[in-house]
Image (spheres, rainbow, N blue to C red):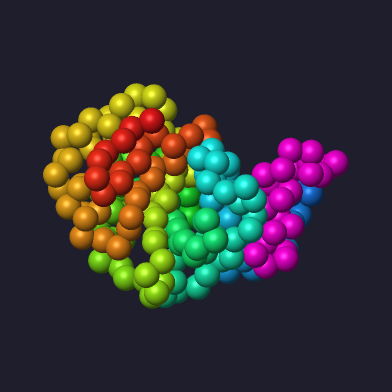
Amino acid sequence: MDLQVETFVRLAVEPGATATGEPEVLAAWTRLNPDQKKQARESQIFIEFSRTRKLVSDPFAHSNENPPLPDIRLLINNCDSYFELGEIVSKELAESISVSQRQRSATGSRVSLLDPLTCILASKKDKTYPTNGAPVELLLYYWTHYPDEATKAAIFEHLARNRESTEQLVQQSQFERVWIYDWHSKAVFWNYERSAFKAF
């Protein structure tokens, strides 16, 4: 990781890493340029996901990559592995938040969490990554949205009802596994491997 990116991420994810708390985290964030902020968000999501799954002993030991490579590269069992990340967020909500930030006002937006999930799977399936045969996994996450229990149940029902089409999307892609991770609860609640569906 870039040094400034790592400084922010450690402040954001390590309990007790800063004595002053949120102000220091915010100050570290404002020092980042747009590219660094993208890397910092991806690293924060990946590290907290990795801890949830006990993926590696040191989740900070990864690098942020630029296209055409996937977002994250790390060693798993001494072999290169990659993760491509994508936020599940509706276009309407993203636009609403952008307008609110520009106008410094609150705006409302009715959103669905099902359509953006289908859209991001469809948009990622045709991408190819020059990883020299190293495996690539897709980590989809909720950050802007907060999926409550009723929403999660609706997502499970949607995935079950559209199992065949969802399965085809993944089978047509380069991804070995697909994860759905909720940053708010720090929990994986869906995982697809090429051989089977799994829900957590």
Of residues 199 and 67, the one drawn nearer to the viewer in this rendering? 199
Which of the image's four quarters has the N terminus?
bottom right
Q: Position of residue 132 (x, y in %)?
A: 39, 74
31 shown above or below 89? below
Q: Position of residue 87 (x, y in %)?
A: 42, 51
Magenta-tinted stretch: 1-22
Of residues 146 and 182, the one drawn nearer to the viewer in this rendering? 182
- Residue placed furthest toward the top: 150
- Residue placed furthest toward the right: 19
Q: Residue at x 72, y 43 (%)?
A: 14
Q: Residue at x 31, y 44 (%)?
A: 192
- Residue placed furthest toward the front: 77
Whether residue 111 is visible to the viewer of this picture, yes or no, is: no
Q: Position of residue 19 (x, y in %)?
A: 85, 41
Of residues 156 and 195, the one drawn nearer to the viewer in this rendering? 195
89 shown above or below 147? below
Q: Position of residue 138 (x, y in %)?
A: 38, 54
- Based on the displayed image, in which of its 4 quarters is residue 133 positioned? bottom left
Q: Is residue 194 magenta?
A: no
- Based on the displayed image, in which of its 4 quarters is residue 83 positioned? bottom left
Q: Residue at x 17, y 40 (%)?
A: 163
Q: Residue at x 25, y 66 (%)?
A: 126
Which of the image's four quarters has the C terminus?
top left
Is residue 154 found left or right of 89 in the rendered image?
Answer: left
Whether residue 76 is visible to the viewer of this picture, yes or no, is: yes
Q: Is residue 15 magenta?
A: yes
